[in-house]
Image (cartoon, rainbow, N blue to C red):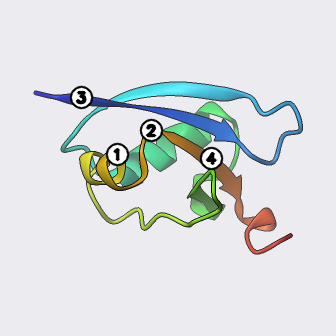
Amino acid sequence: MAKVSFKITLASDPKLPFKVINVPEEAPFTALVKYAATQFKVDAASSAIITNDGVGINPDQSSGNVFLKHGSDLRLIPRDRVGCN
């Protein structure tokens, strides 16, 4: 089973802490979002994953698809920050 690795950075923290998470390609990306949110102690239900360019990622796909489309360097952003400049 092939795995993909993501570097998830907490965008709302000025120190920009990050976690490297390895998951199977077939793993649902929603599970990765929930896991990353719990690692950073933020609410998974009110968080989103974006690219470093600020593009939102639809979580209803496999982790492998996200890796191929957007790469491995992503940001977790709590919903209170979504849509803010």
Quadrant assignment, res 2: top left
Dot placed on the residue nearer the N-terminal end, 4 or 1: 1
Front label number (1 vs 3)? 1
Mark 4 to mark 3: distance in Å?
19 Å
Mark linked to residue 67: 1
Residue 82 image offset from top left, x and y in percent: 73, 68
Going from N to C along the chain, the mark reached first, 4 or 3, is: 3
Alpha carbons under labels 1 and 3: distance apart: 10 Å
Residue position marked by numbered label 4 in the rendering:
75
Q: Residue furthest bottom?
A: 83
Q: What residue is shown with label 2?
A: 72
Spot occupied by residue 28 in the image (x, y as percentages of width and height): 29, 51
The residue at the point 76 percent across, 75 percent down is: 83
Specify which label sits upstream in the sequence, 2 or 3: 3
Pointer 4 with pointer 3, Cβ within 8 A: no
Mark 2–mark 3 CB contact (< 8 Å): no
From the image, state whether disc 4 or disc 2 is nearer to you: 2
How far is mark 1 from mark 2, CA to CA? 6 Å
In 3D space, how far apart are the residues under numbered discs 4 and 2 (Cα atoms)?
10 Å
Give above or below for 67 relative to 16.
below
Q: CA distance from mark 2 to mark 3?
A: 12 Å
- Label 3: few (<14), some (14–19) or many (≥20) C-alpha neighbours in 10 Å: few
Mark 2 residue crowding within 10 angstroms, few (<14) / some (14–19) / many (20+): some
